[in-house]
Every structure is written in structure tokens, then in C-alpha cells.
Image (cartoon, grey):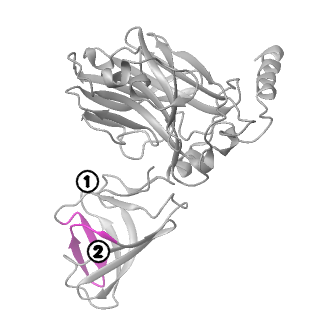
């Protein structure tokens, strides 16, 4: 990099009033972490499928998509989220919708000073490409005050960095809590309930018909692909260079919302426990970071998917449930199959099937 380029980048940061510290409010914007899976097919409903912190929102359509974390090296990025239309829907009903979004806690967006006289601009930047030219919408949605702002962006067959700045909103402060306050959404398909109005690039009271006016339809052909990575959300009117973080730091940030203890692996250690009595097996798991709330369990269950090794013996266990949970730790129990242990006996729990998976979730 030339000296002139270095000074130009430094100037961008200074202009944006971000001399040091974290600039990117989003987590996993480089699509590096994918605890659930690297690919999911036949998607027809809203949910988290592949890369962490990015949720597909989808409903009322016959279209189907595949989502994947893919290697696509460019501009310092090794990974991207790829969406493919695998079943088209060219007869668009009014209530159809599809896109990808990420939700942000209120306590993490206070720096925007939204709802005050000195509210800050919000800048979104990201890299996109597709199989053909298309027009989609990027939206900021204020959940606390039902306010929205959207802007159109273009996609071509080459990687392009898109930058969109949203003017300060002096109406409606974000709640200072751990609930979803701000949603960053990319609208890729919508029926007239979401596209028949007029797009507003400034924050206005929410009206669904205005949210994605003017977009193309991602589901109009099985040739459609959409790639996105390098998503950054920051304070100010200037898009600074993407803030790369180490994989370990990004993983820990993701684990506040989703923690995969084990994923589709046989003979993997998952915890130590003991028999409370002859029919109840308990084991405790400290969490690597404080989760957003006390988590719920996501588990693959099946005959003898798990094994509890005890003195000179082993018990096949089909599943576990949560006995108690806090944001910092979870007590698991089994009161069904673990019926041959002895009270007070210790146990080491391992997976016993390639399909065994245990995860905890506290998503927004």
C-alpha cells in the first residue's frame, strides 16, 4: 500500500470520528463462523441455517433456496454467504417475502444516539455479487419504535462494495437492553404487501408496503444466486475499511447467541456427570461466554446417540433435556434411559452416533 493510500484510509477513520476501538457493530460480518452447518438445502421458512448471526426471513412462497458458507477469496475475505434459488416462484402472491437479516441488541446500538437532538448517521457497507444484474433493498428497522428506512442497491456478476448512509433519526430512542432493537435486512423478494409503496431512505413510521419497493425477485429463476460478505454497520457518514477480527474473537461473540457443544460427531466428549439416583443422570456445562439469556436446547435425539460411561459399564442414552439453565451454565438431565446406574456414580458422557448434536441457543 502506498503512503498516499495509507493516509487516505487514516483520513476516513478520522472523518468518521472512530480513532480507535471497535467500529463494526455487527458480528460475523465476514461470514467466517458457521456453527450450525456450512450448507442447508430446501429452505422454505424463516430460520438460522448456516453462518452465525444471519437469519433468513421467508414466508408464503412456493420458492425454495439453498444457503451455504462458501470460500470466495477477494478483497481480504475468505468466506461469503451464498444463496441459490432451487425452486422458482414466478407467480408472486401479495404476502410473499424473502431475504436475510441480522438483529442487534439495544444495548449495542446506543452510540447512534437515536431519538436525540444529536443523533448520528448510520452507515452500512457490504460486498455483493450475483449471477446477473439485479436490484435489492437494504433496510434498517427500529423494533422499539416501529420505524424503518430502506435504500436500493445494485448487484452485478462481479464483487462490488456497496455503501449506504442513513441520515440521523431524532425520533425514538433505542431501548437499552438485551432485546432486538435494530434489524439490518436485505430484501431479495417480496409481494405487493411489501413492494407496492414508496421507498424511504430516511427513517419514517413503519408501513410494510414501503419496505422493499422497487426490488427484483430473487425467486424468479433457478439461475439466481446471491453472494454477500464484508458487512459493516458503523456510526457516521463515511464507510471505513472493514474491521477484521480474529476467528477466536468472532466465535466467542457468536456464542453469546448460539453455542454448538458438539455437531454431528461420533465419540466426542461432551461432559462429566453423575447419577442422582438409579434413574436420573445429570451433567453440567459451563458456557464459554455469558449468553444473551438463559438458553434453550437444540439436540439430535436417537436410539443410543449418547453414552454415559460409569464404573465398569456404560449406559446408552437417547437424549437429554435441560434441568436448569442460566446465561453462564446449564444442567442437563436424563430420566428415561439412564435407569441402570447407581446413586452417586460418576459418568463421562460421549456421543455415540455420527448424527449426534447438542447446541444451546439464545437468539434474538
Image coordinates of residue 288 in percent, x first then y, are 53, 61
Q: How many marks?
A: 2
Q: Main secondary structure of the magenta part?
A: strand
Is residue 153 inside the magenta stretch? no
Q: Is residue 25 above or below residue 16?
A: below
Image coordinates of residue 333 in percent, x first then y, are 31, 75
Q: Residue at x 49, y 24 (%)?
A: 138
For the view shown, which residue lies furthest in the left direction? 303
Q: Is residue 84 above or below residue 279?
A: above
Q: CA distance from mark 1 to mark 2?
A: 16 Å
Residue to which mark 2 is pinned: 308
Q: Relative to the observer, which residue lies in front, 271 or 250?
A: 250
Element type where label 2 sits in the image: strand
Image coordinates of residue 34 in percent, x first then y, are 43, 42
Badge 2 local density, few (<14 within 10 Å), some, or many (20+)?
many
Q: Which residues are magenta?
A: 304-322
Is residue 313 inside the magenta stretch? yes
Badge 1 local density, few (<14 within 10 Å), some, or many (20+)?
few
Residue 226 seen in the current view:
yes
**Mark on residue 354?**
1
Residue 101 position by quadrant: top left
Q: Left or right: 229 with respect to 276? A: right
Q: Is residue 30 above or below residue 255?
A: above
Q: Residue at x 78, y 16 (%)?
A: 5
Q: Relative to the observer, which residue lies in front, 105 or 329?
A: 105
Q: Residue at x 28, y 14 (%)?
A: 223
Amino acid at each position: 500500500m502506498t503512503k498516499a493510500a495509507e493516509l487516505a484510509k487514516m483520513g476516513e477513520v478520522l472523518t468518521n470520528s472512530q480513532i480507535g476501538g471497535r467500529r463494526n457493530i455487527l458480528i460475523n460480518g465476514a461470514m467466517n463462523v458457521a456453527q450450525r452447518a456450512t450448507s442447508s438445502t430446501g429452505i422454505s421458512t424463516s430460520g438460522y441455517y448456516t453462518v452465525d448471526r444471519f437469519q433468513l426471513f421467508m414466508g408464503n412462497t412456493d420458492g425454495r433456496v439453498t444457503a451455504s458458507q462458501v470460500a470466495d477469496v477477494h478483497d481480504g475475505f475468505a468466506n461469503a454467504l451464498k444463496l441459490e434459488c432451487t425452486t422458482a416462484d414466478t407467480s408472486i402472491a401479495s404476502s410473499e417475502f424473502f431475504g436475510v437479516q441480522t438483529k442487534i441488541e439495544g444495548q449495542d446500538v446506543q452510540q447512534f444516539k437515536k431519538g436525540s437532538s444529536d443523533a448520528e448517521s448510520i452507515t452500512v457497507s457490504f460486498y455483493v455479487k450475483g449471477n446477473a444484474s439485479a436490484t435489492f433493498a437494504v433496510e434498517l428497522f427500529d423494533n422499539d419504535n416501529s420505524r424503518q428506512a430502506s435504500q436500493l442497491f445494485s448487484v452485478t456478476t462481479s464483487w462490488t462494495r456497496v455503501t449506504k448512509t442513513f441520515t440521523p433519526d431524532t425520533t425514538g430512542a433505542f431501548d437499552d437492553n438485551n432485546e432486538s432493537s435494530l434489524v439490518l435486512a436485505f430484501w431479495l423478494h417480496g409481494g405487493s404487501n411489501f413492494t407496492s409503496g414508496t421507498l424511504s431512505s430516511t427513517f419514517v413510521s413503519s408501513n410494510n408496503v414501503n419496505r422493499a419497493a422497487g426490488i427484483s425477485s430473487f425467486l424468479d429463476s433457478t439461475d439466481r444466486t446471491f453472494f454477500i460478505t464484508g458487512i459493516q454497520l458503523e456510526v457516521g457518514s463515511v464507510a471505513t475499511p472493514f474491521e477484521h477480527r480474529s476467528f477466536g474473537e468472532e466465535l466467542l461473540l457468536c456464542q453469546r447467541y448460539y453455542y454448538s457443544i458438539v455437531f454431528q460427531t461420533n465419540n466426542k466428549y461432551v461432559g462429566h456427570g453423575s447419577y442422582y439416583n438409579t434413574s436420573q443422570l445429570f451433567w453440567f456445562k459451563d458456557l464459554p461466554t455469558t449468553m444473551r439469556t438463559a438458553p434453550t436446547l437444540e439436540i439430535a435425539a436417537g436410539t443410543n446417540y449418547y453414552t454415559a460411561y460409569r464404573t465398569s459399564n456404560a449406559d446408552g442414552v437417547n437424549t437429554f433435556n435441560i434441568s436448569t439453565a442460566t446465561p453462564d451454565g446449564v444442567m442437563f438431565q436424563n430420566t428415561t434411559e439412564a435407569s441402570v446406574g447407581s446413586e452417586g456414580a460418576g459418568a463421562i458422557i460421549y456421543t455415540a452416533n455420527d448424527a449426534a448434536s447438542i447446541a444451546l441457543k439464545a437468539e434474538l
